[in-house]
Amino acid sequence: MSYSKKPLVGIIMGSSSDSKVMHSAAIALDEFGVKHEDQIVSAHRTPTRLPDYAKHAEKQGFKVIIAGAGGSAHLPGMIASHTTIPVIGVPIMVYNDKTSSDKFKFSAFGGLDALLSISEMPTGSPVVTVGVNKAANAGLYAVKILANEFPELKTKIRKHKEVQHQSVLRESGEMKKLGLARFANKKFKK
């Protein structure tokens, strides 16, 4: 079995508007060559899809499911209750209210409602939770889980960390050379 030929990660979200955040998980997985399958599964509008999706994920041999949801954020916990596959929950601050005339609405509590809904799962149905809108971290965490089975992913993760390390050293050197005010002005031009 290879992580680059067959999807081993499922990315699901409650609404198409969640793709604005969840695409970062796909980008992270793509960076490491990890195949994934992406779908919309609403815990509230398509509740009967939850057990069907869980069965599908198990049949396909997924190793991780990344589930993003805003507002009451039931999707990650509900999918976790239907499968033994590890679930990484992404709380989303922006969500689409299908009854509203506005294109997008913001979570009334700035994503805190989704964060608490996902992170405070009752004992017995755990969900790993990343920060609000931190889908990229969910993708990276999925890669780390897969790295336990695929040693070449561990090598790629180490290389990724080294690239991050060198980037910080370069920026620090540039800041030292330019001074903080000029560095910030150059980096964050408005």
Image (cartoon, helix red, strand yellow):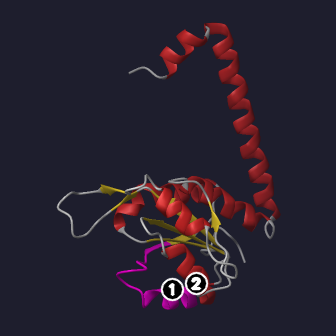
Under mark 2, the amino acid is Ala
The quadrant of the image that shows the N terminus is: bottom right
Q: Residue 32, percent across and down?
A: 65, 56
* Residue position marked by numbered label 1 in the rendering: 53
Q: Residues within 10 Å of mark 2 (few under 14, many from 20)?
A: many
**Image: 128 above or below 83:** above
Residue at the far left: name it.
Answer: 101
Q: Quadrant of residue 159?
A: top right
**Image: 185 above or below 155:** above
* Residue position marked by numbered label 2 in the rendering: 57
- Magenta-colored span: 38-57
Under mark 1, the amino acid is Tyr
Toward the viewer: 76 or 33?
Answer: 76
Toward the viewer: 105 or 41?
Answer: 105
Q: Is residue 51 magenta?
A: yes
Q: In the image, 19: left or right of 187?
A: left
Q: Residue 29, percent across and down?
A: 60, 59
Secondary structure at numbered mark 1: helix
Mark 1 and mark 2 in contact? Answer it, CB < 8 Å.
yes
What distance separates the C-alpha of mark 1 from that of mark 2? 6 Å
Which residue is located at x 49 percent, y 16 percent?
186
Q: Is residue 67 magenta?
A: no
**Image: 50 above or below 91:** below
